Image (cartoon, helix red, strand yellow):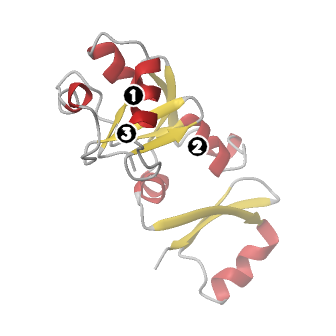
Amino acid sequence: MLKDFVLGIEIAELGNMAVANISMAIQERNLVEGEDYLKFGGITLFSKKTPNLPRNLENLLYRKELTDLSSYVPYSHFVETVNGKLSRLKDKFTKVQISGKQFVQITDSELYSVFMSNDLIRCVVPANDVKELVEDELIEGSMTLSNSETLVWYSRF
């Protein structure tokens, strides 16, 4: 999910600059959310592939000191995706802090593949709808979150 992204706060820390400079770079360079950068709550992530960053930030993108985010999901995004239903998933992830920001490292292989794929759409549906979705072949998989809600996923294409 975040394989090609770096944490904005780490760039600020590494470049000895204020975090406000990250927001200014986004505005001044007219960066496009979803392409050049991502925002999840208070977390800003820059794409390593954007050609639009100021040179001083671009020079920091590939430094070894930056955390490899390829196996992490922002905690707020994870909680939002599963409608806050964490109790049945508690043994499937670990909550971690990276530069003071909360992330989830998913330890369950099925849940990991669901969250790390950019080709899947994830949503929560009423548990009693799942059987029909499976019969109609509208979803690729599901995971029970509670007695009344189920996380389902299907391909974008």
Q: Position of residue 121 (x, y in %)?
A: 54, 66
Residue at point 41%, 26% (across, down): 22
Q: Is residue 29 left or right of residue 103?
A: left
Identify the secondary structure beneath mark 2: helix
Sequence-wise, the earlier of marks 1 and 2 is 1
Residue 137 image point, x, y percent? 59, 87
Horizontal side, residue 51 vs residue 93: left or right: left
Mark 3 = which residue?
A: 29
Amino acid on which the number 1 mark rests in the picture: Gly
Residue 41 vs 96, above or below: the answer is below
The secondary structure type at the circle numbered 1 is helix
**Looking at the image, residue 2 lies above or below residue 101:** below
**Residue, x 66% and y 88% (percent of image)?**
135
Query: How many discs mark residues in the rendered view?
Result: 3
Mark 1 or 2: the one toward you: 1
Is residue 68 left or right of 136 when viewed as pictured? left
Q: Amino acid at mark 2?
A: His
Residue positioned 45% across, 52% down in the render: 34
Residue at figure coordinates x 68%, y 81% from the top left: 133
- Which residue type does callout 3 highlight? Arg
Q: Nearer the viewer, residue 129 or 154?
A: 154
Residue 144 x, y percent position in the rendering = 68, 59
Between 76 and 8, the one nearer to me in the picture: 8
Mark 3 and mark 1 lie on one chain; the one further toward the N terminus is 1
Which residue position holds label 2? 77
